[in-house]
Amino acid sequence: MSVFECEVRSFVDGRKFDELLERFGREGEPLGEDFQETHYLSGAHDLRIQRSDREAKLWLKSGELHDSVREEFEVRCRWEDFPGLSEMMAALGHTVEVKWFRERRRFRWHGVKATLDITRGYGRIVELEELVGPDGREAAVRRLYVLLTELGVQPTSREEFDRRYAEYRERWRELVAEAETELAVI
């Protein structure tokens, strides 16, 4: 059976991020936190590799970046397999178009997965996600928007996400270097 990732997301400021972190901690079930390095790869499809503190994975998403519903194919690997994944993708002709470095906190909240991300050079994001079969997509997206509203968060428009992604894509090397320098100074 096909699995579809339904998600809604929004950029938030530091104050709202902290408020949501406290609320999810109080009302939800903590699922963990980790640091992630994700590589978006070249090609006709949304193909990515990632390593976190715990594992590595290869995944493919259908549709367009920032769609609310996308079919998702995922293969999880051991953390130490990430260099091999990277070499395999390069051997297949894929190059790294963008790298993300993020701290992610995950919760189960009101029956959905809630994540809070701090992505270097990009910003703070809250995301609500539910995995469903083909028949549950529309209801899941509606439910996620209701929950986001319950959090007092206005969804960031797709156009704004596309604009900010385009800016990040043009400058990610510089933005990540600046963030790493800032971390070294603190």
Image (cartoon, rainbow, N blue to C red):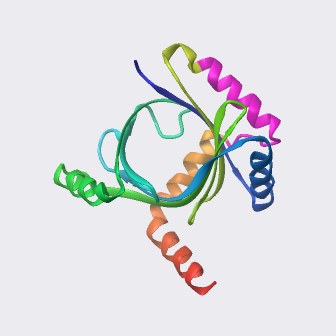
Q: Quadrant of the C terminus?
A: bottom right
Q: Position of residue 132 (x, y in %)?
A: 53, 23
User: Which of these two is toward me, 106 or 90?
Assistant: 106
8 lies above or below 164: above
Decide if residue 77 is on the left or right side of residue 115: left
Q: From the image, give the main secondary structure of the stretch colored magenta.
A: helix
Q: Position of residue 109 (x, y in %)?
A: 71, 37
Q: Residue furthest left?
A: 91
**Image point (29%, 44%), residue name:** 43
Q: Is residue 80 magenta?
A: no
| Residue 37 appears anywhere in the view | yes
- Identify the residue shown where x is 42% and y is 60%: 99
Q: From the image, which quarter does the N terminus lie in?
A: top left
* Magenta range: 138-156
- Residue depicted at x 82% and y 35%: 150
Residue 141, x across and y down, in percent: 64, 26
Whether residue 143 appears in magenta in the rendering, the answer is yes
Number of marks in the rendered image? 0
The image shows residue 116, relative to residue 176, as above or below, that is above
Q: Is residue 47 visible?
A: no
Query: For this rendering, which residue is in front, 39 or 26?
Result: 26
Q: Is residue 157 above or below residue 141?
A: below
Residue drawn at (75%, 58%) of the image: 13
Query: Residue 32 at what x, y percent from top left?
Result: 59, 51
